[in-house]
Amino acid sequence: MARAQLPPHSPQLAIVFGSSWFEQSLLLGGVRSILGGTPVIGGSTAGEITPEGPTKHSCVVLLIGSEKLVWSVGVGEGLDHAPREAGHQAAYQAAQGLQGHQRIGFLTFGDGLATRYGDVIRGMEEVLGTSSLIVGGLAGDDLHFSQTYQYANDLVVSHAVVGVLFGGTGKLGVGIQHGFAPISKSRQITRAHANVLHELDGQPAASVYEEYVGRELINQMHSGGMTRQRIAYPLGIQTGETNQWLLRNVVSVHDDGSMDCSGDIPEGSWLQLMIVSRNLALEAARTAALAATQSLNRVAAVILYDSVARRKLLGERYLAMEVAAIREVVGPSVPLAGCSTYGEQAPVGVASAGRTGVHTGSVLIVAVGT
Amino acid sequence: MPFKITLMFFVGALTAALLMVGLDWSTRFLGLIVMLGTLGYLALKMEQAHRQLADVHRLRDAYDQLDRQAKLIIRTDLELHRTQEELDRRAASLMSLHQLGRQLQVSLRPEEVYGKLHPSIVTNFGFSKGLLGMCTSLDTVEWHSHIGVSADAAEELKKHLITSTLLKRVLTAPSPKTLRTHAATDASERQLLSLLGVPMAVVAGVIPHAGPAGCLLLGGVTDDATDSRGDEELVAILANQLATAVENSALYEGAWEAKQELERKVRERTHELAEANSALVRLNQAKSNFVSAVSHELRTPLAAIKGYASLLGTGQFGALAKSQAERVAKIEKHADLLTQLINNLLDIARIESGRVAMEHRPIAVEEFFATITDLVRPQLEAKRIRYAADLDGITQLVGDAQHLQRVFVNLLSNAIKYTPEGGHIRVGLRRDGASVLATVSDTGSGIPAEDLPKLFQEFYRAADPINQHIEGTGLGLALAKRIVDAHQGHITVQSEPGKGSTFSVTLPAG
């Protein structure tokens, strides 16, 4: 269907959002059997998104054809044991393929089960530079938290990051928002390492968190999985900018009072528990869409990375409303495709001025245009 | 503010120095005044600082109070989330049960029922993996659905269920059982969870009253102990629904097989009957051909017999003695009877073989019955039988006048034969929808009930003592029926011994 909507001779790139429900090699084989040698990038999801709203157990393909854009695909494997090197490898491979073209941005799909994804981004930045735009989503597996998949051309890989580096004279617009607001008082992160939060205000982090969410939820958090209670009140780390918080979900709690989080925790920062409503979340989606499109003269396509936490917390109906709200902003005729992710990566702070970081609970909108 | 206080201290110290080393009383007095002023200012500032500190304490208390309220709100909201999530899950489960019920209604075989575990059912029930299999005994299971589980893993699970006797326990247990990694005391249960790759599972037997049993295994990624009772209840409902569907499909299968058997037998019998019917038709055709051939062969010698008998009767070959003349007359009479018999037989054979086409022309009713009455009048008069015809204003019939005349002459001749002297015979016509019903009634001896069904068969004559004295070929009514049938009409008889008979003929009105 996607192929039929593009002129046959324009250079094409396929972005594939595939349900982990399918046998992955067969799924990619099916896509390739139609598209032939067209470059492919993508990943498994925690639910797919089409212009009509959210779907499940499906495969959504966005085909981009442009005379102004060029692209090159890169793959970095071994994310579970050498994340920095994997990021390095993916970015290097993609940069090699782009030759002398001006770089616009790196769009990635990473393993959603990786615990040190910040290192992956550092690896990419080492190759592409810290001022390069690096955006993307973390692949999911329908909340099974067992194995995610990344696609690059004919390859289906796990524990990997794949990306497409855009170059040429086109533009990528990015907007990321979550809409959560603080509800608790600020606590200082007195001890943290990577994605593990050890102490808040000098006390074990779990005991402070337990004051808010209760013993029962803490007990549940000794095992994996995702329920609405576990994601209803994420941690919000103050970024230093007014009214800007970086969200982190508590993934699990350890007996020593430390907590594994869904992204890096910067020691010394201040942290608050956050809350959201449907209206706030919808407003955030509109703001993100505006931010993504304001720098573009013409929007050709929109890629949506929407945190699975939003889908789980606010429901499928909300997600349909969110997609409709985004389409209102970007234009109803603009092709749109996306998925529910285990995490989003985008510049932290004001659009592309900030360094790339890992986000949670956010809606990331990437607009491709001129 | 600290600068001002430092300045005040500096001024105070300077004043104290003036007081101590002052030259005259006026300088000392000035120093005293300044010092008192400085002390007053310091006292004022101290009071202000004290008040501000109290404000800060109050603000911090308010902040802490707000945080305590936030904790309360969060815990209450989390409870609501838990309840809402459980309600959503129950609603989704019930919706799935409803949809499954509708799908199961059209499941015609137990294998089909066991293949109906759809991914949406598994996820709506709050699970991530599911298997449903059919068990033809307590130690066999064949998976017909496996959701989120590879074919290899399903095979491993099957082997484990059988070898660990878990399957037997499931199929004999009255209700579903929840298995948890951290609570499983049985090594085989822990192994099952490990093979399924989940921390929690519910396993249930599908136990129908009729049809093969089954095994349902659902695995979840969360291990929330508070949900287990609800899960078990829902899974029990699901298992019961499946069992009912298996029962229904088994009953349907039985009924379907019985129907198939019945249809097969009906087909066989129909085939046999068709073959027998074909044989009869062939036989009847052969009989008609035979009768036709024989009749033709008989007519020529019979004509000669009748001709020579007539000649003999006229005395052309010499005068006959009285006894000779009587014998020749008998020969002639019986030759006539035989000719009539042969003609009737030939007509029946012709009509049956379709060689005679009935005309389809209007018949003037009054003229038609007048001709018939003229033909039978001598016999009526001979027996002094009163005759009446009521044509009920009907003027026209449609058919073959010549053949229909034979029908009514035959019926009237029979009526005259069996009606004693001085009796009554009545011909009646009446309109009956698009048809005309003609009746010939008499006050004759009547016909026994057992003879009525066979009355229109060829050569059938009632075993009646009266019949012994009345001549007849047994072909008249058979021929009448063939002619009426050929007009798409009906001929019937109503009779009672001693009370006369009524023959009814239905014919098209036109």
Image: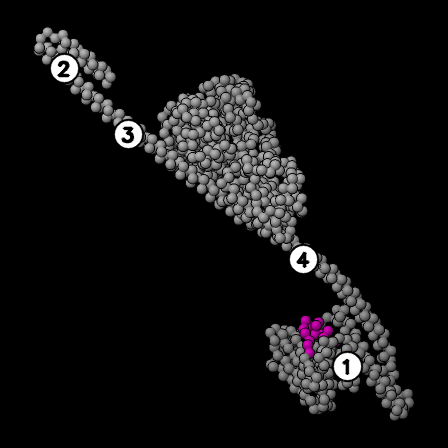
**CB atoms at circles 4 and 1 under 8 Å apart?**
no
Real-space CA distance between mark 4 and mark 3, rounded to the nearest whole angstrom? 89 Å
Q: Residue B259 carries which label?
A: 4
| CA–CA distance in space, label 4 to label 1 | 47 Å
The location of residue B456, given as percent across then percent down, is 73, 76
**Comes first in the chain, label 4 or label 3:** 3
Give SS at disc 4. Answer: helix
Mark earlier in primary sequence (4, 1): 4
Task: Say which of B367 and A44 sits in front.
Answer: A44
The amino acid sitting under disc 1 is: Ala
Judge if badges 4 and 3 mark residues of a common chain.
yes
Which dot, 4 or 1, sits closer to the camera?
4
User: Share a chain, discs 2 and 3?
Assistant: yes
Disc number at residue B34? Answer: 2
Provide the residue designation for mark 3: B58
Q: Position of residue B92 (x, y in %)?
A: 50, 44
Residue closest to the far front:
B20
How far is mark 1 from mark 2, CA to CA? 166 Å
Q: Judging from the image, what secondary structure is the residue with disc 3 in? A: helix
Snapshot colouring: one colour
Circles 2 and 3, Cβ within 8 Å, touching? The answer is no
- Packing grade of label 4 (10 A; few <14, some 14-19, many >=20) is few
Q: Give the range drawn in magenta.
A: B478-493
Q: Is residue B491 magenta?
A: yes
Q: Nearer the viewer, mark 4 or mark 3?
A: 3
Tell me the chain of label 3. B
Which amino acid type is marked by label 4?
Lys
Subunit under mark 1: B
Viewer-side label of 4, 2:
2
